[in-house]
Image (tube, coloured by chain):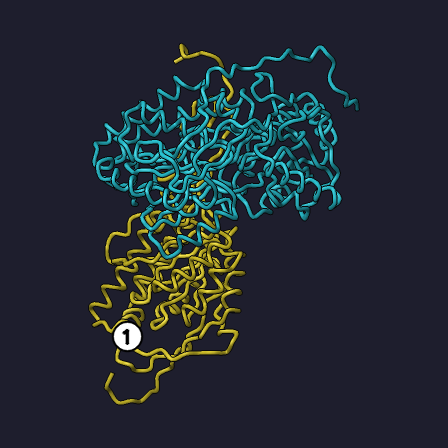
Chain colours: A cyan, B yellow
Amino acid sequence: MAMEKKTAAFEYAPAPESRSVVDIAPSYGLFIDGEFTEAADGKVFKTVSPSTEEVLSEVARAGAEDVDRAVKAARKAFEKWSALPGSERAKYLFRIARIIQERSRELAVLETLDNGKPIKETRDADLPLVAAHFFYYAGWADKLDHAGFGANPRPLGVAGQVIPWNFPLLMLAWKIAPALATGNTVVLKPAETTPLSALFFADICRQAGLPKGVVNILTGYGDAGRALVEHPDVNKVAFTGSTAVGKAIARSVAGTDKKVTLELGGKGANIVFDDAPIDQAVEGIVTGIFFNQGQVCCAGSRLLVQESIQDELLDSLKRRLSTLRLGDPLDKNTDIGAINSAEQLARITALTETGEAEGAERWSAPCELPSAGYWFAPTLFTNVTQAHTIARDEIFGPVLSVLSFRTPDEAVAKANNSQYGLSAGIWTEKGSRILAVANKLRAGVVWANTFNKFDPTSPFGGYKESGFGREGGRHGLEGYLDV
Amino acid sequence: MSETPTRLSVFKTYKLYVGGKFPRSESGRVYEVVDSKGKWLANAPLSSRKDARDAVVAARKAFGGWAGATAYNRGQILYRIAEMLEGRRDQFVREVGEAEGLSKSKAGAVVDAAIDRWVWYAGWTDKIAQVVGGANPVAGPFFNLSTPEPTGVVTVLAPQDSSFLGLVSVVAPVIATGNTAIVIASEKAPLPALSLGEVLATSDLPGGVVNVLSGRTAEIAAPLAAHQDVNAIDLTGADAELARELEIAAADNLKRVLRAKAVDFTADPGTERLTAFLETKTVWHPTGSLGASGSAY
């Protein structure tokens, strides 16, 4: 079939979102005890825009001494914060939610600049979900007696939280909103490639009048994250990131009283049965693996397609992928933005090379990659077996591995043949098959005839080596309560 | 008991309970079990690492069927366990009394509480999903439901002191929700646990759902904490140092870990042990729309 670029009728004029709504300072400090301060050793690092490699700002690099200072501030703030009536804590969170809504365009542009993801996503997915998450947990703060954890459930104390770069502000919201609602105080470390939105959030905390020390933001690298997780005065560790680091954290807290929740990697199976509506399934597959350039822990990175419709589905999928618009993330028409960092691009490149070396067949959408920045064309692999590296390892990029199956049992067996168990998708018009398959899948989130949907009321988290604990919903309170 | 000794009693050979069968340790080893005064009671199997691995195979094999059984059916079987125990109450009163140095009346109270605990958890099997699961009101046209599911194969280090009530209190919640268990009995008082295997075997509980090992807790627990096909571990029967080592080993495949802490097994158990070995699965489906037809009400 024809794979040439679609004709001019489908071309769009550039429609860039204005950068002028966001004012990025040339440098930022750590946010400790309500003040921006330099790192104790004066170290800094640069954060760049992955779509252009332009330096956006220079931020302080936290070390162990800063971690200690931040934990002390959080500990000091805990006494009063946890003693506040829940209804008062709620109002702080409602204020934060509202200010996020007010500043959402600014934050969306900022996030797109620092992360490289399309403005369409930050504007329509990340930011609305961030505000909704704070709004949701705000409402829990004075209702904890009724949450099913017994009367008067107590907070844990100081929460040490380490978040990834793929949804910087959304992951911050998932961590901070339930922690504050339940009366904990927080020290949060954003990822080193995306520190800016967390620093802007610090400013939102100031605007909201949040008592100093309740939220502390430490920008820095893995060493700061480790120091935070291992700090003896931290009562709760929440981590979203790689399974390897998650395991290291699980080891480091062994023998302590620290409560831990881990949201780690995935290799989600997206299962398409022969009776699925092909066009809808194709859209779901695209959403599943190309949303946020596939840099999503719950991505549907393994397509399991019933053998009888494989050719038809792949033809449609390739045709659809050829229409995806890759480029300037600030352009409102862009579907595929930049890969977050040179390091991540190298990892994706290496894994796809392994895929080819092991005998899988590669196809990439025909699109021009910008000369500056970090880019990877939407790619799929066919002739993939379950033993292939690209069928087992999380690639965390816009790369889909296609496997086929004949029977529902085989689909389930292949879907579950993974160390991970975070997400899965099912596409079929048959209701009983959806329920039967969903029941057998060992995954924390199952999307049937949809994919990559998120909501603050909906618990999210994995089975097996995708981690433990749930974020979101009533379930998300448990990880921050002494129950 | 002090009438004319006309008849020599028959001793029981205590054996492991694995996969619904009663094997000796594959190692052929045994160790002496004594009562609270140091009097010999029996030779119990001294389980090896291989016994532990065999138990994992049995527990994994049983998992699909047990997790897939209806909650009602699991409740029926747990209740049946209580019925079987009631019928063998005298035996357990004697064994618990010997194991823990309790008077007959105190041991009786322990056994009664253990029987009642099976009844308590029998009733939980078809209720826990309604308590911890439910519909989530997402902001979009989607059906969204969270349900609890069993974590999988769970290693349970039974408490060292409470050889029977404690044992039942840690095993029953694990299997009530559909997990399968490998239980390491109290090291110094394993006999009530080994006898419980005989009760389980006659209660319609499928073989492999509960597997009971006796021996040195640390020796058996180490390979289980590191085992890649074990999904969770309850450290109740471990001392602080062993618990730390096992928790580190358990991180290799991110086992769910229930840490050791002092427990009063006579108190209301709550739901903590039920929820410790549950995963939450959330399923989404579009609802579509029939349009704004509210006037039809």
Q: Quick one: quadrant of the C terminus of chain B?
A: top left
What residue is rendered at 40% in x and 68% in y?
Answer: B217
B30 lies above or below A415: below
What residue is rendered at 57% in x and 29% in y?
Answer: A50
In the rendering, at what x and y percent does residue B99 appear?
A: 30, 73
Q: Amino acid at mark 1?
A: Glu
Seen as rendered, the residue at the extreme front is: A42
In the rendering, at what x and y percent does residue B165 appear?
A: 30, 62
In the rendering, at what x and y percent does residue B58 appear?
A: 52, 61
Residue highlighted by disc 1: B98
What residue is rendered at 52% in x and 14% in y?
Answer: A18
Q: Would residue B38 appear left or right of A324 to someone viewing this image?
A: left
A454 lies above or below B189: above
Camera sees residue A74 = yes
Chain hosting mark 1: B
Seen as rendered, the residue at the extreme right is: A1
What residue is rendered at 67% in x and 29% in y?
Answer: A377
Between residues B67 and B201, which one lies in front from this camera angle?
B67
In the rendering, at what x and y percent does residue B56 appear?
A: 51, 61
